Amino acid sequence: MRIYLLGFMGAGKTYWGQKLKFTLNLPFYDLDRVIEEGEGLSIPEIFENFGEKHFRLLETKYLRKVSENENVLISCGGGTPCFMDNMSLMKEMGLTIWLNASPGMMVDRVKGQKNIRPLLKNLNEEQLKQYFCRKLEERKPFYGQAQLIIDPIKFDI
Ligand code: S3P
């Protein structure tokens, strides 16, 4: 069984991944950490040195690599389902779950961690809110293809 956790930055993908791996007894990979380990660079360093386009290529490369495991729980980056046909790949390979959290909750979670999220680093709180609402609308057609949609606030294990 392959399970992919999807959702915008701050939706709780890593948090739920850490919890679910014990419940489901599956090896767990956080895709951003896999990319960092594979490349020997942090996500902000990859964005800074090579740009977002290169990051997206790496993201797909490592998504395919971790998907070679037959039994695995993968927490994706916020943009993973929205580039390079990754959503079709994940739906073919396993179960996709969208953690559909509210924009307000996600902004609250990430506002103190902008340094580790290159797409947010130059935004103040108001710009952050606008960015989240706009990007979320853009990405919903991808997230919305998930086979399971969960409001993480109402979900517990
Ligand atoms: C991104 C989300 C980040 C990381 C990168 C790009 C995005 O992952 O992959 O900074 O495009 O939404 P998290 O959702 O785990 O923060």
Image: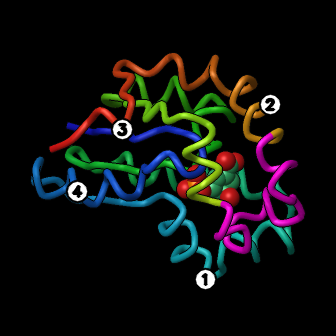
As helix, strand or loop, the secondary structure at mark 1 comes to: loop
Amino acid on which the number 3 mark rests in the picture: Ile
47 and 40: which is toward the camera: 47
Mark 1 to mark 2 CA distance (whole Å): 32 Å
In the image, which is nearer the foreground, mark 3 or mark 2?
3
Q: Identify residue for label 4.
A: 19
Q: Identify residue for label 3.
A: 153
Query: Quarter for ligand 1?
Result: bottom right
Which one is earlier in the sequence, the residue at label 1 or at label 2? 1
Mark 4 to mark 3 CA distance (whole Å): 14 Å
Mark 4 to mark 1 CA distance (whole Å): 27 Å
Mark 4 to mark 2 CA distance (whole Å): 30 Å
Q: Do the residues bearing badges 4 and 1 touch, measured as CB atoms within 8 Å?
A: no
As helix, strand or loop, the secondary structure at mark 3 comes to: helix
Label 4 environment density (alpha carbons within 10 Å; few <14, some 14–19, many ≥20): some
In the image, which is nearer the foreground, mark 1 or mark 2?
2
